[in-house]
Amino acid sequence: MGQGADFRRSAAGKISASYCLCSPTEKGNFLVVELCQSQVRTLLVTLYGDGNMSPSMVYKIFNLPEGITQGKGEALFDFIAQCLSHFLAETIRSDPSKAEERLPVGFVFPFTCRQTQLDKAELLSWSKGFNCNDVLGKDVVELLQSAINKQEVGLCHMDVVALMNDTVGTMMTCSTEARPCEVAMIVGETWAYLVETADETSGRMCVNTEWGCFGDDGTLNDIITPYDECVDVESSNPGEKRFEKMVGTLYLGEIVRHALIGLTAEKAIFTGTDIGVLREKGVFTMHNEEGTTEVKRILEVLGLQPSERDCGRVQQICRAVVGRAATLHATGLAAILSYMCQTRDMETLMVNVGMDGELYKGYRRLLSPECMATLLPSRDGSGRGAAMVTAVALRLAALRREVNEVLAPLRLSRADLEKVQALMREEMERGLGKETNATASVRMLPTYVSHTPDGTERGDFLALDLGGTNFRVLVVRVTEEGITMASEIYVIPVSIMQGTGEALFDHIIDCIIDFQTKQNLVTDMLPLGFTFSFPCQQMGLDKALLLTWTKGFSASGCVGQDVVQLLRDAARRMQVVALVNDTVGTMMACGYDDPKCEIGLIVGTGTNACYMEEMRNMGTVEGDQGRMCINMEWGAFGDNGCLDHLFTHFDQVVDQSTINPGKQRFEKLISGMYLGEIVRQILMAMTEKHLLFQGKLSSKLQTKNIFQTKFLSTIELSNGLALRQIQAILNELEIEASFEDSVLLREVCQTVSLRAAQLCAAGLAAVVEKMRENQGLEQLSVTVGVDGTLYKLHPCFSTNLQNTLKDLAPNCNVSFMPSEDGSGKGAALVAAVASRAANAME
Ligand code: 0WK
Ligand code: BGC
């Protein structure tokens, strides 16, 4: 029977998702309404927070009026709403304690729907003889809610908070804390449903297979009999629901009827009897297996005079039809169980299967020996389960409201970003202004780099790259053929970062000497380019006063000093010809391959940008011809309070815990040194509010810097391993977490990193718009050379940044060029340009 695999392939198209994540805490009164074959069942279920062990239930059944299943959809939903109100009025009359302000309603709707939320489901197709107009393609939750709102109940307001298929209700009904149920099947009327939980990238979801449509693509043609064809042709939806028409009781009788007609035609049965009655559709219904006497009675009721032999044959045919239906159910169930076994990499799968409907005893063990399935008959239909799902919907909605409250301040609107862009522009203008520069938060520092490489650079250069995650020493050879480099990474211990300036520069010299020794350069007097990634007031290419330290550095005796001199002092023989910021180094390195590269961006430990500005706009440097690269030092944007409206409580806490509180405010919203800490603060707040980790605050999570920014990249990855990697990180932090916790953790990380990317984009939008205006262009086309671990390694930072930039600066066509070799190469190129200029002067 290859049907299992075929089953999985063809049913897949029809799968609809339904969300249900139960916990033992669900409690309260829940109204449930079930639309069944010929009736509406209304229930009031009270849950006691005991894991669905002993809910109490009262219910009432209303028969569907004749013809309503073929009439207007509005009439059907009005009827359902009326049943609800009558039931409620009656129940509250008999037990006033059940009266509530608002009552949540769970709606069991056993038809094929595309479900996009627990309370949003679009009807895809009717069946089971239902065919109301004006419902297909509509959200049936909305239809029921508006029918309820029309009711003049006045007793209490009913909110439909969850819709589910009857299979899901059955699974939840059979599922208790002690005996979780992960599969459900209803074999009754016409449908066979399988609910399966598939664990993929992030946790599990209950999937309603809608397997009734299995075979609609012809997969089952080799087992479909002529009798099945007759039943299908006569049905209201020929060609559809082929599997259902072979297994559903609504059709089994029809299959038998056509089999009897066929056999009569072959004179194998009812010889000499008028079987005209058998030509009437629906005249033969399936009853539970009876002895030949009862068969005889049933046939005589139909006006047939069956012989003993006829009765035996009719019984045989019934058994064959029911037997086949049970086998096909078992086949489908086996296919799903073995699929669950495979997707969970399990040797053996032990699973409880919630069952409802009649035909389910039979042949399962033969087909999936690796699965141990316990069939749990549902005693209460799907009503009790529906109440569980409704309780979950209510809890999730409450959780969602609280989570949104916590995260709302971190979610920036377009207006927020436009305001940041405008403020950045304002600060840029103030930074460029001779009078206003000193008080501007964005210092717009001249770099004395007036040209980007033109390819004529030549020579060997030493380069240093200090200020990022790694300190690197490089030797760079620039020839006609291009650039070759060798480099070595050295560690700058925190004790050196936060010790004396002398010790820091001595350490740098030690690294250079180590590198020169390894590269046989000891005797060479190579020009050196120094990438120094901290705010410096440059007086020239090789003269730069350190304005302030950032990124955890605080070496004493350096602020206000000429950094080039500090290095020269440390190394008597060193020929430092250029000091550049890492943004400038990155722009130059990328500019060597792309002449349109006129902006440098770093989003790593820290963040900053530089760009080529017109000298006429720079009030802080003499001359107004040509252009010069401006190191914006945008990390300090907002240090004058202009961004205070954006700072959340979490940002304040993080800022206060740094060695430079109140400084680098923009950087502290964006860069890698701080994002992990912001997330940690949010996680602690959510834990205290019992929104996460069951309110248990692990001591590790209270440790500063324990939640590294690289965790965000791992957690926001959306591949098959994500859940396991999130679990691994939480284990490392000694945090016990549920699947929901992992999903919420990811949402927190996504919110923080998205804000960072958007703010970065708002800053860049101000820069490119200024350059476009500078050049008086309608449309600017420019390249940004970019570096930094956050930009390069975070799974969606760069995309979010680029999408936001496109939105904020539509007249600028901006491409991004990740720097391959870092800004050391750029520093060497600046040294090359400087050397070329110096040689030209001699
Ligand atoms: C690599 C560059 C270096 C820069 C760093 C920034 O070569 O100059 O400072 O990127 O990224 P981070 O290492 O801070 O992530
Ligand atoms: C520094 C900048 C540097 C940026 C990126 C900031 O903290 O002030 O000079 O460009 O980090 O490394």
Image (cartoon, rainbow, N blue to C red):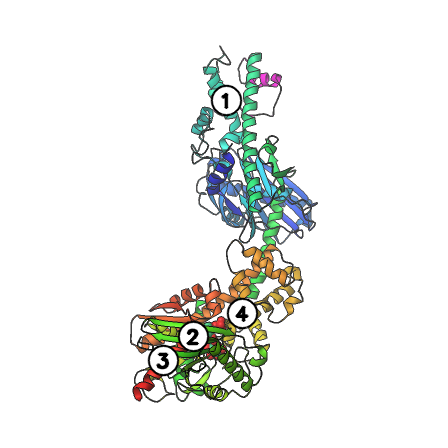
Separation of residues labelled 3 and 2 (CA atoms): 14 Å
Give the crowd class for mark 2: few <14, some 14-19, many >=20 residues within 10 Å.
many
Q: Which residue is under mark 1?
A: 257
Residue that lies at the very extreme toward the top in this rendered image: 272
Question: How far apart, in angstroms, are the residues tagged by discs 4 and 2?
Answer: 24 Å
Q: From the image, tell me which residue sits under label 2.
A: 823
Total marks in image: 4
Sequence-wise, which precedes: disc 1 or disc 2?
1
Q: Secondary structure at mark 3?
A: helix
Stretch of the chain drawn in magenta: 280-306
Q: Say which residue label 3 marks.
A: 832
Which kind of residue does numbered mark 1 sit on? Arg
Q: Earlier in the sequence, mark 3 or mark 2?
A: 2
Q: Quick check: is the Cβ at mark 3 less than 8 Å away from ligand 1?
A: no
Front position in the image: 689 or 331: 331
Mark 4 to mark 3 CA distance (whole Å): 37 Å
Q: Is residue 576 above or below residue 750?
A: below
Residue contact between numbered discs 4 and 3, judged by CB atoms under 8 Å: no
Considering only order in the chain, which callout, 3 or 4, is on the residue closer to the N terminus? 4
| Spatial separation of the CA atoms under disc 1 and disc 2 | 83 Å
Q: Please say if the residues under marks 4 and 2 sit with CB atoms less than 8 Å apart.
A: no
